[in-house]
Amino acid sequence: MLLHLPGVLHPSEVAQAQALLAQAHWQDGRVSAGEQAAQAKNNQQLPENAAPAPALRQMLLQALERSAVFFSATLPHSIAPPMFNRYGGATNAFGNHVDSAVRYLPGGQKRVRTDLSCTLFLSSPSDYDGGELVIEDPFAPQRIKLAAGDMVVYPGTSVHRVEPVTRGQRLASFFWIQSMVRSQEQRRLLFDMDQHLMQLRTELGEQHPAAIGLTGTYHNLLRLWADV
């Protein structure tokens, strides 16, 4: 499932993130790539211990907590610390690759299975040319270039790339999620059911027998499929 989440960051938060990143010192993005991805990767990345990184991560994680749709769609068990990258100039693209199945977090004491990949755009589409996130799909490639503050969530199994940036700079945050529900199909069914349940509660009320019964069914399926 590919999901567009608009307005994850408020405009004031986007402006704050842009200001912090404008003063940052960047490094070669290949430092965090696996063997195959490193051959295709040509961008810059904010070092994990850089001065603005903790404040930026906290801002983004707090923003995710505001989004009920994000929780419903991803059912997060663990979220890898958000990272930040920059495309432009001579370091302007990332060829086709698949994200590593497991990410080792700083310190090496914890691992996250990359069920879901996330990209949050921090530059306005008018600030740069090119730079589309292209996610290969059995039907047709999905070309994604979102407003600053918007985020896309997509399966970690996807082949994807970032097209060359030919003007300006593209700033983004990227990170991975290990879901409580490993199966993409089961997560999609639970997400669809939850969205319909919210509509049902709005139209019929929280205490309507159908709303109560289907809420029970949702939680029983989650209990059956979730790994916590």
Image (cartoon, helix red, strand yellow):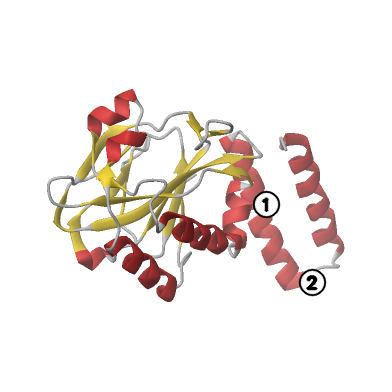
Mark 2 or 1 closer to N-term?
1
Tell me the residue that label 2 is attached to.
205
In the picture, the quarter occupied by the C terminus is top right
Instruction: Say what amino acid the circle numbered 1 marks.
Output: Met
When the figure is inspected, residue 192 is found, relative to residue 30, above or below; the finding is below
Instruction: Say what amino acid the circle numbered 2 marks.
Output: Gly
Q: Nearer the viewer, residue 4 or 82?
A: 82
Q: Position of residue 31 (x, y in %)?
A: 32, 35
How many marks the image carries: the answer is 2
Q: Is residue 216 left or right of residue 72?
A: right
Tell me the residue that label 1 is attached to.
193
When the figure is inspected, residue 194 is found, relative to residue 106, above or below; the finding is below
Query: Pointer 2: residues within 10 angstroms few (<14), some, or many (20+)?
Result: some
| Residue in the image at 56% along x and 37% along y | 184
Residue 147 visible: no
- Per the image, label 1 sits on a secondary structure element best described as helix
- Per the image, label 2 sits on a secondary structure element best described as loop
| Residue in the image at 42% along x and 76% along y | 12
Question: Which image quarter: residue 157?
Answer: top left
Q: Position of residue 29 (x, y in %)?
A: 29, 40
Q: Which residue sits furthest bottom? A: 12
Query: Pointer 1: residues within 10 angstroms few (<14), some, or many (20+)?
Result: some
Q: Position of residue 60 (x, y in %)?
A: 49, 59
Cβ–Cβ under 8 Å for marks 2 and 1: no
When the figure is inspected, residue 189 is found, relative to residue 126, above or below; the finding is above
Q: Is residue 137 left or right of residue 30?
A: right
Q: Position of residue 154 (x, y in %)?
A: 45, 44
Inter-mark Cα distance, 2 to 1: 16 Å
